[in-house]
Amino acid sequence: MMSNQMMGWGAIIVGVLIAATVMLGWNESLHYLWALLVLVWGAKALMNK
């Protein structure tokens, strides 16, 4: 299981990326990319346990 710190940083990073996407007027399809990056990060963290 991922540590609370790892999960916290993941949530912060996704929030910042989504906020930047909206604030800068980027294509909202990037939300899927951010979600994919977090999924990969989480899967990698789980595999290292």
Image: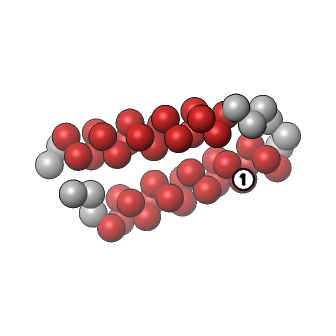
Question: Taking 12 as reference, is 42 left or right?
Answer: left
- Near-viewer residue (33 or 6): 33
- Say which residue appears at 85% left-offset and 40% top-offset: 25
- Toward which corner of the image does residue 24 lie, by quadrant? top right
Q: Hey, which residue is sitting farthest right in the picture?
A: 25
Q: How crowded is mark 1: few (under 14 residues within 10 Å), some or many (20 or more)?
A: few
- Toward which corner of the image does residue 15 lie, by quadrant? bottom right
- Looking at the rendered structure, the kind of residue marked 1 is Ala
Q: Where is residue 21 in the image (x, y as percent from the top left)?
A: 74, 43
Location of the N terminus (image quadrant): bottom left
**Residue 20 drawn above or below residue 28:** below
User: Which residue is labeled 1 in the image?
Assistant: 19
Q: Hey, which residue is sitting farthest bottom in the picture?
A: 4
Q: Hey, which residue is sitting farthest left in the picture?
A: 49
- Say which residue appears at 35% left-offset and 59% top-offset: 6
Q: Position of residue 8 (x, y in %)?
A: 43, 64
Question: Taking 16 as reference, is 47 left or right?
Answer: left
Determine the secondary structure under disc 1. helix
Question: Taking 16 as reference, is 25 left or right?
Answer: right
Q: Where is residue 33 in the image (x, y as percent from the top left)?
A: 57, 33
- Say which residue appears at 45% left-offset and 43% top-offset: 38
- Near-viewer residue (20 or 33): 33
Total marks shown come to 1
- Say which residue appears at 73% left-offset and 48% top-offset: 20
